[in-house]
Image (cartoon, helix red, strand yellow):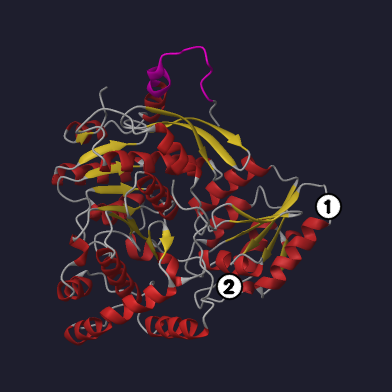
Amino acid sequence: MSERPQNDDPDPNEAFDELVEAETDRDPDLAVIEAGSRTLRAQAGPPQGDGIPARPADPEVDRALRAVEEELAGRWGETKLDPSVQRIAALLDILGQPQRAYPTIHITGTNGKTSTARMIESLLSAFDLRTGRYTSPHVQSITERISLDAAPISAEQFIETYRDIAPYVEMTDAQQEYRLSFFEVLTAMAYAAFADSPVDVAVVEVGMGGTWDATNVIDADVAVVTPISLDHTDRLGETPEQIAGEKSGIIKKDATVVLAQQPVDAASVMLKRAVEVDATVAREGMEFGVLSREVAVGGQMLTLRGLGGEYPEIFLPLYGAHQAHNAAVALAAVEAFFGVGSDHARTLDIDTIRSAFAAVSSPGRMEVVRRSPTVVLDAAHNPAGARAAAEAVTEAFGFSRLVGVVGASADKDVRGFLEAFEPIFAEVVVTRNSSHRAMDPDELAAVAVEVFGAERVQVEPRLDDALEAAITLAEEEGEFSGAGVLVTGSVITVGEARLLMGRS
């Protein structure tokens, strides 16, 4: 962890120059690509709460929402898809192209998309813009996926939006080889809700990939690419380079690309795409970045270098170096949206930026849901996410003993995921969530035994039993021992654990 600058009046550019130097140890072939792309470098209070809605209190509304959920669930799920935007484009044509009614910031990448989207939303809201946010998957309620003014739409509005477009969905289904999928219908609902609101700007997270993702019927002014690593390899490719090729499809002509730190081969693909479409590029570690960060009570204190200059003393109520980098990316994206670095050279109002970041929440991402013993939830579900979570929990909490609760999906790199946590988990309790994609606990245990050894692995097929077992193991150390529990492996596991722990 880097340290914040001391108050001895150093040259404000020195720290950033060091950051640039540290980040330019890269493949020299990239120099040619970067020479051909334009780069961005300036020359010269949102709603509170975690944004997780409970089930509707009104029984009639709850029944109506469940009916809509059942109808959506009867369609292709998010993991079964035909890679094409043809169906969603046909539906939006019938609806009058609602996605053209507002500017957008489009976000792709492997990890950090939802947290980055929430930060961007908070920043835009702090500048008095009406926002729409579309993210996936949800932690507890399907209505989380569509937000207006930094809050999930109500169950009533979700139902109304679905009913409004349902006849056109059926019309489109009849014209296409395959019916619209669950995700395609939700995407159309989000775009329609944003247009009806109307919003000043939409923040849209891809579902998977980029080029053929259902969200990619927008021409975003700003395209954001969070760190790329291996995930969904059966759909997106088996190398960061192949995955980047798919994700680069959200970069449109004359857009601004905000690029988080990437593997060299992934960065090469993104920069080539930027050259092809004459997009402007802002790269973490070059045009913007994290200058310093310190662990603070309830989060961390940051100094960020944006496209317009330095932003000191930013409190971020989220844990981990990865969230600091997400914050830098979010800030650069909002600066780019406002034209900082291209139209003018200045920082955004520092007090507004500070209040916006201080109000950020990201449920299920290093979220504390209980004390004594401390229980932390994190939705990491691939090896890269697991490594970031392991570093964050070690840095922020310093548990004397940490017990893991893991419920993973069968289609993930479970071994790589568990290996990332092996150094910090004293014991691991393997379990499953309610999803049909969940890995069988015994199969998960077999892999865990190979990684941890049999004496460190416990199997509890039910998640509630797994939580109780992990808490009991942590309590064996005594009330003041500093032991804790980390629940992880899947967004679904985390969401169900959240409910079981009384967060609703």
Is residue 5 highlighted in magenta? yes
Residue 130 x, y percent position in the rendering = 32, 54
Secondary structure beneath disc 2?
Answer: loop
Q: Quadrant of the C terminus?
A: bottom right
Q: Quadrant of the N terminus?
A: top right
Res 150 seen here: yes
Q: Amino acid at mark 1?
A: Glu
Q: Is residue 202 above or below residue 34?
A: below
Secondary structure beneath disc 1?
Answer: loop
Residue 106 x, y percent position in the rendering = 29, 53
Q: Is residue 238 above or below residue 442?
A: above
Res 29 seen here: no
Residue positioned 61% across, 69% down in the render: 499
Residue positioned 22% across, 57% down in the render: 102
Q: Residues within 10 Å of mark 2 (few under 14, many from 20)?
A: many
Residue of label 1: 477
Residue 52 x, y percent position in the rendering = 51, 63
Q: Is residue 184 above or below residue 149?
A: below
Q: Which mark is residue 433?
A: 2
The tag earlier along the polypeptide, 1 or 2, is: 2
Left or right: 177, with 22 as reference point? left
Q: Amino acid at mark 2?
A: Asn
Left or right: 93, with 156 as reference point? left
What's the magenta region? 4-17
Residue 63 x, y percent position in the rendering = 48, 86
